[in-house]
Image: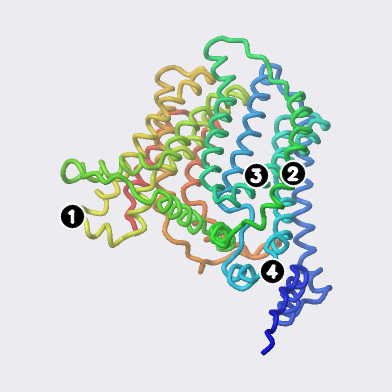
Amino acid sequence: MTGTTAPAAPSAREFRQWVRTARQAAHPAKRFVGVLTEVVPYVVIVGGLVVQSVRRLVELAGAEPPVSDVTAGAWMLLAAMVLLVTAGVRALGALGPVSAGRPTLTWILSTPVDRRRLLAPRFWAGAAGSAVVGAAAFTTAALVGRLSLMLVTWSAALGGLVAVAAFAAMVVLEAGGRAEPLSRRISAVFAAGAVLLAAMPVLSSALGWRLAAPPVEVVLFVAAPVFLVVAVVGVVLAHRALGRLDRGVLGAGGDVAMTAVTSVAWLDLSLLTGTLEFRRWRRMATVRPRRGRGRGLWVLLWSEARRVGRMPGAVAMWAAMAVVPYAGTLVVSPAWAHPVQIVAGGLAVARLTAGLRAVNSRPGLRRMMPLGDRVFRLVHCVVPAVAALVWAGVTTPAVASATGAGWAAALLVLVASAATALAGAVRTATKPPLVYDVPSVSTPLGDLPLGLFQQLLRGPDVVVGLALLALAGLPPVVLAVLAVGAAVACVLTRSK
């Protein structure tokens, strides 16, 4: 009996062509005219908004800043660029530079076709998208930093090259299964560097040192060619490593990417934050068990403190945000000092409400406790309240120094900032699930679901509103009374 040879596996190009034909047969393509009428208006509208924004930023770039702000602005610009790289590296590590959904993993990547050639289109698309995002981010930072047109161009080139290099490095690390843990460590180092760069003018101003402006031009002219070589070498190595990407690594980022798309489509970021929170606890796997201390309310307070201790990233962000008011006093007018402190405080304290979010989303857990709903909420507001008071106490000297306020006015500023941060954090943490059955208002741009926008702005509306009142010049005593009233109302509101 003669043996039969197995048919050879098709090439990646033939396989993609077959998949494309099957998809077109199942879902017939729309007419070209229909695609134009659906896509072109959105492209024109969004493109017009982008062009107008860029033109406005260019106008701002042409305005010369005060001489005293040039040095601090240059350091802030470098800190912003490093912070953008930090965010990019962390996002690439969490989402996976090259990822795939469950259908692709099951029906396509499980075939014996060359995996490197199958993933090549995804790889090049990811590299191109990273370059565009990096160039846009660095261009925006350069325009806000009022650099010249030539330096803005170099910043765009550097941003694209840095993004491509980071993307390629994450692909190589992903092939070894180390992208996610190493991205956390690298982003932590970069974030510390960004905070240090932003703190340089603050420390020099506090200690009376004469700080020279960093050579931004030299950094751009030297870094761009260096990252060009790094990006080229990284892309070559990453393209070769595509064949080593296993299905487990590809599927890890695919779930987060799908959740992110769903969160954006449904305007509900709690889906994404919940997934990331689950991944964080799963990565920790186990923790050292400790017996609760005390009785009654003290056990809940001890558990809340332990929960915050297991979130070093949130605590680090809370501490790093204290640099923002001091840095803001060096680059903005004194009228913006208190609003900047209010907004930064709201962002800093919002990450320290994990316990309040947990009990708010679980009515059954609250009913199991021998406490009233209001007492249960008050217990879980202790940690955010203490964090808001400490943060406001550390940052109020910057506002008092910029505005020339006395000790009484500074105390009112402290109270207003702490109460606003607490109100915004509690209001955000106790946000109920989104309700999409809301009335809409007809406008020339279409129907606007104002009720949905109101739900999305729950929490930030208090912070932004009080910041605008502070910017309008409201007396500190009135602002403090309003902030305390808002905090009391948010804390005592009954959970649903």
Q: Earlier in the sequence, mark 1 or mark 4?
A: 4
Q: Is residue 320 left or right of residue 52?
A: left
Residue mark closest to the camera, 3 vs 4: 4
Q: Quadrant of residue 414?
A: top left
Q: Quadrant of the C terminus?
A: bottom left
Q: Where does the N terminus fall, quadrant-wise?
A: bottom right
What residue is rendered at 73% in x and 62% in y? 117
Q: Which mark is residue 113?
A: 4
Badge 2 vs badge 1, beta-carbon distance below 8 Å: no
- The amino acid pointed to by label 3 is Ala
> How far apart are labels 3 and 4 at the CA level?
25 Å
Q: Secondary structure at mark 1?
A: loop
Q: Which residue position is annotated with label 1? A: 370
Distance between mark 3 and mark 1 Cα atoms: 53 Å
Q: Residue at x 21, y 55 (%)?
A: 369
Q: Where's residue 331, x and y in %?
A: 63, 24
Residue 449 at x, y = what percent?
A: 57, 63
Q: Earlier in the sequence, mark 4 or mark 2?
A: 2
Inspect the image, locate mark 2, and give the three-letter code of the amino acid beneath it: Ser
Determine crowd level at label 2: few under 14, some 14-19, many 20+ residues with C-alpha closer than 10 A: few
Q: Amino acid at mark 1?
A: Pro
Mark closest to the chain's N terminus, 3 or 4:
4
- Residue under label 2: 53
Task: Say which residue appears at 57% left-offset and 50% top-offset.
Answer: 176
